[in-house]
Amino acid sequence: MSKKKTKSLFQEYHPLDYQQFRIMDDLGKIVNQDWFPDLTDAKIIEAYKFMHYARTVDLMAVSYQRQGRMFTYPPNLGQEAIGTAAGFVMRPEDWLIPAFRELSAWLLKGATLNDIFLYWGGSEEGSKFSGAKNFLPSSVPIASQLIHAVGIGYAMQYNKQKGVAFAFVGDGGTSQGDFHEALNLAGVWNTPVVFIIQNNQFAISVPVAKQTASKSLAVKSVAYGITGIQVDGNDYLAMHRAITEAAEHARTSNGPVLIEAVTFRSGAHTTSDDPSLYRTTEEEDKWKLKDPILRLGKYLIEKNLWQEGQDEELVKKYKKEIDAAFFEYEKSPAYEINDVFQHLYHDTPVDLKQQQASMERFLNWERTQS
Ligand SMILES: Cc1ncc(C[n+]2csc(CCOP(=O)(O)OP(=O)(O)O)c2C)c(N)n1
């Protein structure tokens, strides 16, 4: 780390001081050398390329959905720095407890492109992540995953394992009771959980100002007696430093950390949404200048570590790889419609059996119509 400090990062950026932690400005200029992360140039280039890769997967997923080859998909555009930083900091023994909009973290934790396409193609097989360790499936009820994260953290602590649970949630998720219960229990039990709120300004059409009267989301950590920090979520270097410090804090039995990563969802909520109905192009244009890839790219170009034309070549190569993986995915056998009843309970409860029978009757009826 760059210089000896008298205060920890979390003391220097205490949530009650309402300062956002950042390392570079919107033009990629370093404005906070003191907290520059312990990363070599090669590691920064690796992260930059990975953000491009994750973005290419994301943009192509939207395109496959538009072509009718995949189902509803939630774009990650503009939020790549957060999941990429978490993914690079996470160790194999750590757990990833996802929300659903952190594709880069999924990929770095070991999800394959096939897993991703299966999941958003509606197959239960896509939740298995067979090649990845310590990775929960997406939990559709918003914020319910945070309760699981605290349980996992508690279990690791009980078993004297040194892992950390990384749990994601959106700004909208902070209005759910589960968010507050999870933070409360994590504080009381001192569990090794790093909560990452991706504050992307909207929960579908609801702006963050309608989620809370608090001046920030990070400040909610204070009420639960846990460590918290607000970070510029579009600044890869700041995200990497904050998550590294948070993981270390949790791993060394100092308890949970709440990180509010301030970002912007540049795409739609999902492919079924139209953001032009609830936000302005001025707002979108303002955030485009803060794009995480653009900013890190400017930093690298300024340091002569990257040339402008290189991005195009890279993306072209990634597109080819992703398309090849998608063609493979399209060869997968069609999933059994009954799968939706089969992955939750060991013994299927009566009401689910009734729903299953009703669905089968409907499908049989539908077949007679064609
Ligand atoms: C308990 C619950 N209520 C409502 C929904 C429907 N829903 C899906 S995503 C979403 C918005 C989530 O917003 P946020 O937490 O900010 O995450 P983002 O989508 O912005 O990443 C809602 C309301 C749900 N899945 N679960």
Image (tube, helix red, strand yellow):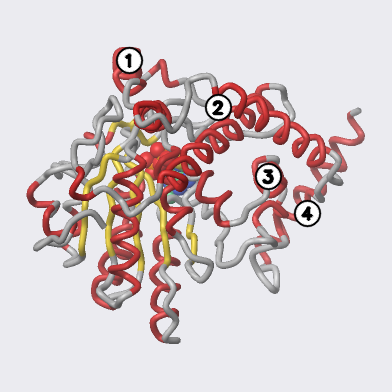
Q: CA distance from mark 1 to mark 2?
A: 18 Å
Q: Residue 265, percent across and down?
A: 40, 31
Name which of mark 4 and mark 1 comes first in the sequence.
1
Q: Indicate which disc residue 338 carries.
A: 4
In the rendered structure, the answer to whether residue 112 lies left or right of residue 171 reads: right
Q: Are marks 1 and 2 in contact (CB under 8 Å)?
A: no
Residue marked by disc 3: 113
Residue marked by disc 1: 280
Mark nearest the camera among 2 and 3 is 3
Name which of mark 1 and mark 3 comes first in the sequence.
3
At 69% from the left and 62% from the top, the residue drawn is 130
At 41% from the left and 58% from the top, the residue drawn is 167
In the foreground, 185 or 255: 255
Looking at the picture, does residue 4 appear above or below residue 86? below
Mark 2 nearby-residue class (10 Å; few <14, some 14–19, many ≥20): few
Q: CA distance from mark 2 to mark 4?
A: 25 Å
Image quarter of residue 343: bottom right
For badge 2, the amino acid type reads Ser
For badge 3, the amino acid type reads Leu
Describe the element under mark 2 as helix, strand or loop: loop
Q: Residue 58, percent across and down?
A: 57, 33
Mark nearest the camera among 2 and 4 is 2
Mark nearest the camera among 4 and 3 is 3
Mark nearest the camera among 1 and 3 is 3
Image quarter of residue 122: top right
In the rendered structure, the answer to whether residue 80 lies left or right of residue 185 reads: right
Describe the element under mark 3 as helix, strand or loop: helix
Residue marked by disc 2: 272
Mark nearest the camera among 1 and 2 is 1
In the foreground, 303 or 107: 303
State yes or no: Cβ of the residue under disc 1 lies below 8 Å from any atom of ligand 1: no
